[in-house]
Image (cartoon, rainbow, N blue to C red):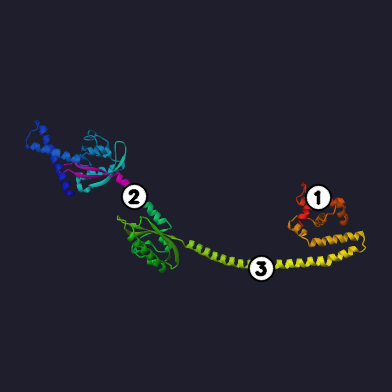
Amino acid sequence: MKDKRRKTKKQLDAELESARQRLAGFESAGSPHPRNEEYDEIMAARDLYRAVFEATGAATIVIEDDMRIFLANKEFERLTGYSQTEIAGSMKWTDFIADSDRLIMEDYHRCRRIDQSSAPRNYEIRLVNRSGEMKDIMITVDMIEGTKRSVASFLDITEHKKRDRALEESEQKYRLLAENVLDIIWTTDLELRYLYVSPSVEKLLGYTADEIIGKTVDMILTKESLLKARQLLSEDRERERKVPGKPFQSRTVELQQVHKDGTLIWTEHKMTFLRDSDNRPVEILGVTRDISKRRQAEEALRRSKLELEVKSKYLEEANTALKVLLHHKDDDKIEFQSTVHANVRELILPCIEKIKACRTSSEQSAFLSILELNLRNIISPFLRNMTVHHFNLTPRELQVATFVKEGKSSKEISELLNLSPRAIEFHRENIRKKLGLRNKKMNLRSYLLTLS
């Protein structure tokens, strides 16, 4: 059908040329156009050609042997931005062509007039319109039979080329991503036969993509993982049969794969169905990631947790045993203290009372009083409380504090300890400072009694 249309166009071109020559003959003879059958045929052929020429839908021009444009239609006017009056008979068709394409176009023009088959009928060029805008154009050129004229149609493919370039750039980006990403991008049919595998598979599994494409997944999965994968696929297909899923609805699963050298690798697979226009699954798209290090870390964490639980249980048992021992120790300590206290009260203090009843010097009485006081303090909680509270009293300050608690005056204490009253006052002041009573209106003896 296309060849028939092209032949018809050539016939119309030839008929128009014949009519133009006959009209030129009439005009050169200086006679008016005869209104006869031949004239009507000529005018009809001209009108038909012009109708086809204008209604073709493509920008079309008729080109003279010297490259001047003999005739241009409205579409060519719209494409270039120049009017038909400006174009016809004045401009060459190469005037609209980018510099980089002009020489080859001129060469085609000359060759076509020597041998039409020596120049391509269709080729691409870049056209520059009146405003300087560059357009991608597909040209179709035919010679008018019996003449040196040619007819050229211009099809604007600028948007198509832009889409092609954008698609090519997008494909290059995705190809670059697929070929350089560490994860493996793959597709399989519903029988789990690989249709595509990204080159990164070689880094992870040792196989090239060509070695895997066309093979099923059992080539690189352990038996357990293969059973798991087929089970999941069966479940998903059964669910799809009942209720179709959403596009890009994915599933993530961990599987163990076999390297080409036989080593085992844990991998994570994120998969989704690729669907046809009826939303039916036709292929599986997946991304595989090496998780060996993560699995090793999880295993190490599991072992560490188990060891920690064992140690914790051991510590609990040790703590229980220690509590029992401390409890026994406390019981022994209480029993020991009770024995000491009883012995002091029943055996030592009565002896001191008897000695004091005998004739003794004042100095001896004083020492006996000190001895008795210290023994009573041993069996009282006072010294223990003074130590527990960490007041950091010196041994001498502890002696002074003990006598103050017993109600002794500074003079009496000085005589008992063989120190000057001034020294006793100095110790009393230090005791107040260490007990936090300095600059406070609180009786020292009253405070010490609260610690007994």
- In the visual, does 361 lie left or right of 324? right
What is the x, y in percent for residue 197? 37, 60
Counting residues from the start of the chain, the first of labels 1 and 3 encountered is 3
Q: Specify the amino acid type for callout 3.
A: Val
Q: Which residue is label 2 attached to? A: 167
| Residue 402 seen | yes
User: Which marked residue is nearer to the observer: mark 1 or mark 3?
Assistant: 3
What is the x, y in percent for residue 451? 76, 56
Q: Nearer the viewer, residue 178 or 419?
A: 419
Counting residues from the start of the chain, the first of labels 1 and 2 encountered is 2
Query: The residue tagged with tag 1: helix, strand or loop?
Result: helix
Q: Which residue is label 1 attached to? A: 429
Q: Looking at the rendering, which quadrant does residue 362 occupy?
A: bottom right
Q: Specify the amino acid type for callout 2.
A: Leu
User: Which marked residue is nearer to the observer: mark 2 or mark 3?
Assistant: 3
| Residue 92 seen | no
- Whether residue 248 is situated above or below residue 320 in the rendered picture: above
- Span highlighted in magenta in the image: 138-164
Q: Was residue 16 drawn as part of the magenta stretch in this picture?
A: no
- Whether residue 16 is situated above or below residue 189 in the rendered picture: above
- Cα–Cα span, label 1 and label 2: 96 Å
How crowded is the residue under tag 1: few (<14 C-alpha within 10 Å), some, or many (20+)? some
Query: Can you say which quadrant of the picture contains the C terminus?
Result: bottom right
Residue drawn 27% across the image and 46% down it:
124
Q: Nearer the viewer, residue 441 or 278?
A: 441
Is there CB contact under 8 Å for labels 1 and 2? no
Counting residues from the start of the chain, the first of labels 2 and 3 encountered is 2
What is the x, y in percent for residue 325? 68, 68
Q: Which residue is label 3 attached to? A: 324
- Cα–Cα span, label 2 and label 3: 80 Å
Q: Nearer the viewer, residue 186 or 28?
A: 186
How crowded is the residue under tag 3: few (<14 C-alpha within 10 Å), some, or many (20+)? few
